Structures are given as structure tokens and as C-alpha cells.
Image (cartoon, rainbow, N blue to C red):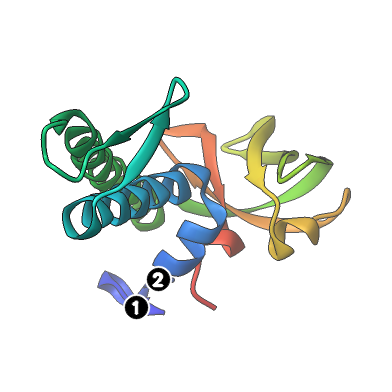
Amino acid sequence: MTPLLGGIFMEKLSIKKSIKNDYILMLSVCMMLIGIVFFILYKQFGIKISKHARVIDISNGEDLFYELIWIIMFASGIVIAVLRYIVLKSIFQTGVKINATVSSVNFYGDRGRAEFFYEYSGVQYNRGVALHQTKETRGLNVGDQIALLIDENNPKHFLIHSLYCEE
């Protein structure tokens, strides 16, 4: 935990757990990795790609299209990851930690949805969130009490505290 002003403590946002549990962050990191790997393979070794049943040799540098796609993919991944991390960090710094009750959990494939019932400032909320199926999210059960970090300016937006916090 990191000390803040007035003796209040803020838990630290874990980049590793955030990438593992946050779809947007995970997909943006995948975009970066795919973009840079294919760009390096293209520049170092050349790549043969099958298109409409014919093989195009792009190792001679004549086809800049693929190079641009991989660079754009990498750059887009960086921009999306940075913006998402800023949003997560903001909620962690200014969010309010409250207890909520899991009202439903459903998974299909590697994705799922959980609904939570909580109260903030005298208003009751029953809100859901899309989940990536991981060891932590599979442990959610109906009726469980769980800590949420809510955006105090918009209490409908929240994060599941344990999925983003360093333990």
C-alpha cells in the first residue's frame, strides 16, 4: 500500500493483474505484440503470405501495405493501452472502495458477465460487468461479498478491486 495525504492508504494498481483481467488492456497488448513481431519478422526474414491462392513475396520491400498495417497495429495498441491504464489509474486514485454482493455470474467460453448489488450515497445499484474468464473470476459465486472500486462521480462505473490490485 502506498501512503497518501492525511494517513489514508491507497493500494497499488497492478499492471500484470490488469493486463490479465482487463479485456481492453489485454487486447491492446496483444495488438502491440502481434504488430511488433510481424514487423520484425518482415524486416529481418521476409514473410510469404498466401492471398487468393497465390503466394506474395513481400521480402523485397515492394509491398509497403503490410509494413504499414503492422506499424499502425503496434501504435494503436500503445495508444489504447496507455489510455486504458490512465482510466484504471484514475479510478484507483479517486475511486471509493465499497462492499457489494454478487447477484449473478455467467460464463460462456472465455468470457462472462457478473452482476453486483451495492449501495452508494443512499442509492441502490444492480450493475454488471463483462469479465475475462480467469482463475480469479471463476471464483466468483452468487451471494459472495466483494470489494468494488466505484467512480464517485459516476457510481454506475466500477472495477472489481481484487482483479486490479496488488495483494
As drawn, the label of residue 12 is 2
Residue 14 visible to the viewer: no
Q: Residues within 10 Å of mark 1 (few under 14, many from 20)?
A: few
* Left or right for 64, reference 130: left
* Residue at x 40%, y 65% (from the top left corner): 15
Outermost residue toward the front?
54
Task: Please provide percent x and percent y for residue 46.
Answer: 24, 51
Residues at discs 1 and 2 in contact (Cβ within 8 Å): yes
Please give the count of numbered marks on the rendered protein. Answer: 2
Q: Nearer the viewer, residue 108 or 65?
A: 65
Identify the secondary structure beneath mark 1.
Answer: strand
* Left or right for 61, reference 131: left
Q: Amino acid at mark 1?
A: Thr
Identify the secondary structure beneath mark 2.
Answer: loop
Residue under label 1, please give it.
2
* Residue at x 69%, y 59% (from the top left corner): 134
Q: Is residue 92 above or below residue 79?
A: below
Mark with earlier residue (1, 2)? 1
The quadrant in which the C terminus is found is: bottom right
